[in-house]
Amino acid sequence: METKQFADAVLQGLSLKKKKLPSWLIYDSKGSGIFNQITKLENYHPAKCELEIFNTHKSTFSKIFSSTATQLIELGSGDGEKTIILIKQLLEDGLNIQYTPIDISEGAINSLVGSLNKQFKNSSLNVTGLVADYFKGLASITDKNKTRKMVLFLGVTLNNMDIPDAKDFLKKLHHSLSHEDCLLIGFDLMKNPKLLHRSYNDELFEKFNLHLLDRINECLGANFEKELFVQQGHYNPHSRAVESFLYSTCKHSVQIKALNKSFEFNEWEAMQTEQSFKYSTQEIETLASECGFKIEENFYDSKRFFVDSLWQVIK
């Protein structure tokens, strides 16, 4: 990640009357590691629900793949836990697989590619990892045979974007794909706010959010003291999002050398660090339609807490 992009995001966010920083700032290798621990928590339902979806519907996914030659591409692949379930099923069904995970983390890509090559040695799986921005990665994939692409965008990455940003992202993704290419995309659905509160207030979430301060200190020469902040996640009924905040426990000032600037924090002032929007099925249908896709099928977990929605590109 470019230092300028990081610095610009911090300057913009801390200059707001209501301070707000984007959650992508947290994701270096350590931040990604903490989030991976979060996905294993008993009360953090999105990861568990999506794993259930893949285990339940893997044969159906395989039939979709076998209907025509398909290239498998994953945006933000992480450790590939869910995708491995799909790959195993595709191999059992005798399919040749070209899998291209795309991630900005070189460590994550190297680890995943190495793990897959070891686990599926002497199989028909061909893995090509790309360390890149999603759209640059997609643009670099050349396919003379015009093979259909199946893009996986799993987890809650889209849920973490503001709604206008999510629409811009999906329209850009639509532009990057061809007619009849497919997108399998994850959405966390609206549910009991008490369940949402339990999901986003484990001590690991506090560790994850406080890591943002370490990142700013490290990248921009700031002097944030983590001991002066506490984290809390809240469900906002107006935005329909779980919003996470770091609260300053006392009045103090933070200097950021790279910005040549100081920022004042009042006692118990809130700084928003994360958001996760919760969707209804109707909102997902509207989003798909507005961004140039049609929904082929929705795949739910048994509690209908989460959906992986299969979209087809319409040109």
Image (tube, rainbow, N blue to C red):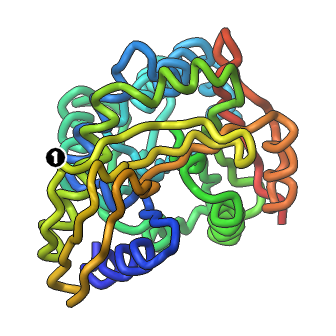
Q: 235 and 283: which one is in front?
A: 235
Residue designated by label 1: 227
The residue depicted at 58 percent of the width and 18 percent of the height is 195
- Residue 298 in the figure: left or right of residue 278: right
Quadrant of the drawing holding the N terminus = bottom left
Q: In the image, is residue 140 above or below residue 28?
A: below
Q: How many marks?
A: 1
Q: In the image, is residue 270 above or below residue 134?
A: above
Where does residue 49 sit, x and y in percent of width and height? 55, 19
Where does residue 207 sit, x and y in percent of width and height? 24, 38
The residue depicted at 20 percent of the width and 61 percent of the height is 215
Quarter of the image for residue 126 reads: top left
Residue type beneath disc 1: Glu
The residue depicted at 57 percent of the width and 26 percent of the height is 196
Where does residue 280 sit, x and y in percent of width and height? 79, 35
Quadrant of the drawing holding the C terminus = bottom right
